[in-house]
Image (cartoon, coloured by chain):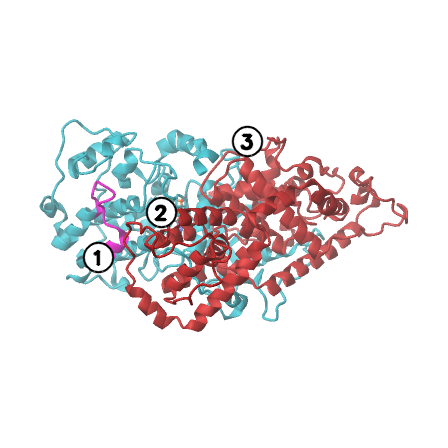
Amino acid sequence: MATEDARYRESSQYQLWSFSPTQLAAMREKTNAAARARIAQRLSSMPASSRNTSAPTSSANTPDPDGASTPALPEFLTPAEEALLVTFNTSELLRAGDHAEMSDEIKATAAAFFRRFYVTNSVMTYPPTEMLMVALYFACKAEGVFLSITDFIKTFGRENPEEIIAGEFLLCQGLRFAIDVKHPFRALRGAVMELGTFPDIEPARLAAAEQRAREILRFSPLITDAYFHYTPSQIMLAALSLADRGLAERLIAETFHYVAPPANNSGAETPASSGPDAPAPSRKPAPRSDGEDKAQIIGSHIRDKVLGTIEACRDMLSKELPERREHWTNKAVIKAQITPLRKKLNKCHDPERWNLVELQRARREQASKKADSEDGDAEDKAGGGTIEPDGAVFGGPLPRDTKRRKMGKGLEDPFGPPL
Amino acid sequence: MAVSPLVAPTTDALQSSSRPTSSSLKRQASAVPSSNGNGTPNLPSTRAAGSGGMTLDPIEQLNEDEKRKYIKGKKLGEGTYANVYLGHARHDPSVLVAIKKIKVLQQTYRDGMAPDAVRELKYLRELHHPNIISLLSVFSSKDQNLNLVLEYLPLGDLEMLIRDVDRVRYGAGDIKAWMGMLTRAVWFCHDNFVLHRDIKPNNLLIAADGEVKLADFGLARSFADPGRRMTANVITRWYRPPELLFGARHYGGAVDIWSVGMVFAELIIRAPFLAGNTEVEQIALICKQIGTPTEDNWPGVTQLREYTVPSEVVPVWGKEAYMGRFGAVGPDGVDLLVRTVALDPKKRITAREMLEHRWWRTEPKPTRKEDLPRKSSGGEEKMGADLRRRNGLLEDESNSRGSKVARKLDFGQAK
Ligand SMILES: Nc1ncnc2c1ncn2[C@@H]1O[C@H](COP(=O)(O)OP(=O)(O)O)[C@@H](O)[C@H]1O
Ligand SMILES: [Mg+2]
């Protein structure tokens, strides 16, 4: 529907969080480069004794050839390595959501939040293992489920609620305060309802396709960049096409009033489609009258473009089919790919941002110092206060002597002991 | 098919500059992850901050820039979870805004950002409509509090007009204009799968040009999937529909329509139509004035958890019964009113059907918004008292049942 198209373009998902692959890659590179520069600067202005490199957790690493006297900069993560960590942690996030038996929407929103946050923030700046929990907690709220933080952390065997609360505002800011995420789940229900009105489609086939498509939607688009590049209905159609290509093509054909050439290829990897002699379900066909109009308005080139887009989305999803869940929890994979990055991260993370609790405490302190002189909510200030443009809002120097929090629990297992 | 568009070409999203930008929110926002056209993202460069010598990260810098755009002035009003201030643009003091600063509620709400704030932010960020208050910008103040920059609506709210019987006169054409704006706002919400859940005259603010704007989305939520439970404890009591009073956990846009009907009635009689002091009293009033919900007029009603009605069954009143009290809007207006207060939510008129109703097209025509009656000066004084009545959750409830209901929600229900 044309209005729906216009409507989607009004959404923050489209306006703020949709990019081409090239653009997304450029942004991530820029984020990475900016973080390196900042961290390098921050590290070199620190007394050597409080450097990350002196943290006990890094002792397992190769000894620094230059010795402790020359404070060499650590090796930073590359954009590709950051991307890998984000993907790995998205998988961890989804597992955590499963563990807590969260709804599909909450998990999907959390995953989108998490991946959006790390477009403009580096994993070297803010700890992904913390942020994934923050994303889950905030996604619950965004989806209208308001849990006490105590209950939330209990589910994950954690003790300190502050760790989550401290990151919430940060996350929200990183999302540019756009906290509504549009998912393909509703579109899938709509598609299945529409397909259900076709008398020649066997209900069993449809049910199987729906189940598989839903399974895909629960994982593949969430762990890839699909939400950045495609609309919910494109993602839905791509997932449906992976589940049952014939059904997806049927739906597209119907939408664009386009009769596909006799299928000699398309059903290749789909369950045998029902022939005309299949028992017709007693459902009445949907009115087709507006199909004519659609066909006139939407030229075939648009249809081809749509097909191309869906095909591209399908390719993206097919790289992370639900079976890949095991890949991301495979011990050998983690040891070979993730552990080395964690070690690197131990040394190259941002000394001024990494500890969310301290960061928030420092900012609050800064704020309360200022609070007396301005920005008060007291009635007697009415007419007075301005929002001061002072640069100290995010703080003067953070306390640097505070002991660095070890990266223990969070990194090993984001959601506590195994079930 | 209730799906999002097939044909939104993703590439269009890249030309951020080519998109219409109606608010600074969009401009500011698109400046973050968008590109300047050659594929290079437009992240602001890191600048050294003033006093501390600590550098700001890009995201912090953006927030600073956004905050700098506004200057906060006197307090306009106070709600349960926010203070609202007048503000103006730094670059042009004639551009007025309202800054809704979410209170720090760490003592009472230690779970981070409060539900009202989350809901309001979520929905206002997405809903762009002339009859819905627009969110111009968002920034955080130094104490990590959320500030919502809203369009400034200087002419008070509908409640002020309704109550000021001595000084504010209005007629059927005016009511029709106000109702039209309200109905379009509600239709737009529902069309976007959003329930407002706190419609009442006090949340209908009035812009300088007379346009009515639905505000206060602190209780809004998305339509749940059929099957997902929602809290019944929403909507200020006088505007709360019978299904919620009976504890229904599955409901839809019809709850807002009842409230719209109550506002309609109140506009006509210039007093709350059904003003119960307790939930029990509210149900009794509905039974008396509209009719007793029974299995006959509302199949399934007796199964609702908290269904109880006074023993004396009152048959549902017909249109004629309303003519005496509500006849000022004519028979067509009364017809519309009666349809909004159908007891059975399934039989209640929808927002879209309301907009198609013949009343809008019969005489008198809706008054042009510029010509609508306005509040008399000095109306501000009474704001404080209204605000103490919490939207949706009334005071007595928010301390007891309301908060408990909210706390009880768990993952199980989220499924
Ligand atoms: N945009 C605005 N322009 C002018 N006054 C406003 C605006 N928004 C809110 N107010 C004033 O602040 C009061 C509280 O705002 P509201 O959004 O209803 O908050 P709450 O959720 O606390 O009820 C309103 O009743 C109104 O008096
Ligand atoms: Mg209010």
Q: Amino acid at mark 1?
A: Lys
Residue B327 visible within the image = yes
Residue in the foreground of this view, choosing between B177 and B386: B177
Mark 2 is surrounded, within 10 Å at the Cα level, by few (under 14), some (14 to 19) or many (20 or more) other residues, namely many
Is ligand 2 within 8 Å of the beta carbon of the residue shown at mark 2? no
Q: Is residue B343 magenta?
A: yes
Q: Are marks 2 and 1 on the same chain?
A: yes
Residue ID at (51%, 64%): A309
Q: Which mark is residue A150?
A: 3
Q: State if disc 1 and disc 2 touch (CB < 8 Å).
A: no
Residue projecting furthest to the top: B311
* Chain painted red: A
Mark 2 — residue? B196
Q: What segment carries the magenta color?
A: B340-357
* Chain painted cyan: B
Mark 1 — residue? B176
Residue in the foreground of this view, choosing between B259 and A366: B259
